[in-house]
Amino acid sequence: DGIFRVAVPVFFIINGYYFYSALDNGTQILWIKKVFSLYFVWMVLYSSFWLSIPDASILGLLKLSIQIAVGYYHLWYLPAMIGASLMVMMLHKVRTSYVITLIAITFIVGVLIQYVGNYHLLPESLFDKVFNTSWVHRNFLFLSFPFFCIGYLINKHSIKYVVSTKALLLGVLLLCVESYVNYMHPLRDGGFDNYFSLIIVCPLIFMFFINKQVGGDSKNIALYSSAIYFTHYFVLTALKGGTELCETSLTVVTIIISVAVSWLVIRIILIVLDSIASAL
């Protein structure tokens, strides 16, 4: 719940950075369709984990609708990214100063919801229950949009700010301090997705590495990162059910097995695509 929390916001920044190109050349609808297709396919593949026949009540249908709209477990990232991209499409002609203000407002509201919920600042109220529901603050508006839009603005305005190693380390230290204080606080209840310091350190991380020339097969890296993301929960669930590993060991073993599974999945997909191409 500390330094690893940079992962999702940084990925959103990367998504927003490259979404600018899609918006600039008019392929944004195709981009959204591809993301939606991924979401549909993997929601179907994970359907045995979340899909059940709802009762005929309005509440039952509402819960099912929320699950489909928000996404199961880690798949929440995809509808959140789609929602953020739609917001950027609506705002791309708005003055940047207004957009930055909206980024600040949505981000701060999301973090405050997380803090108010985790510290039960509104005990025994409907707000306390709602604010402790993860998708209320971990969604397209309060988490995805701020970082997605930051990436979009960096590309739109060709920002080439060079981040020093010292500045990056200070940003990481700030996140460590915030997460440590929360971890040690006796009144804290639950983990964190949102930290105030993420809005500082995550853009710094992105800007630090975007200016680096790193050799390698980016296409191959992209395939593996996607495959690991989509398959790791199958591995995690199997290990939780069949082992008694502690959380740290569980994390390490999940990573190792997920890499192996991803290699297998990529090989299968490539074989299928080659077969289809040959048939055509």
Image (spheres, grey):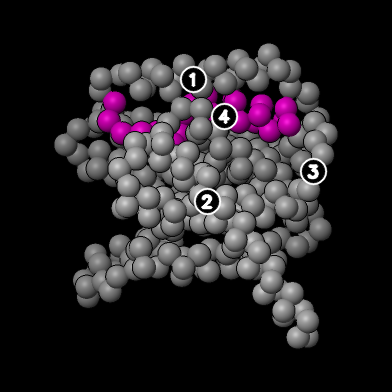
Q: Earlier in the sequence, mark 1 or mark 3?
A: 1
Residue 122, image x, y percentages: 24, 32
Q: Is residue 80 above or below residue 276?
A: above
Read off the residue under disc 2.
258
First in sequence: mark 4 vs mark 3:
4
In the picture of the structure, the residue carrying the numbered disc 4 is 199
Observer-nearest of 61 and 224: 224
User: Residue at horizontal 43%, vertical 57%?
Assistant: 234
Q: Which residue is mark 3?
A: 216
Mark 1–mark 2 distance (CA, rounded to whole Å):
27 Å
Q: Where's residue 46, x and y in %?
A: 43, 64
Q: Position of residue 116 (x, y in %)?
A: 32, 31
State the CA–CA distance, disc 4 to disc 2: 29 Å
Q: Mark 4 or mark 1, which has the lower sequence index?
A: 1
Q: Which mark is residue 84?
A: none
Identify the secondary structure beneath mark 1: helix
User: Sequence-wise, which precedes: disc 1 or disc 2?
Assistant: 1
Q: Is residue 197 above or below residue 76?
A: above
Residue under pointer 1: 176
Q: CA distance from mark 4 to mark 1?
A: 14 Å
Is residue 220 among the parts visible in the rendering? yes
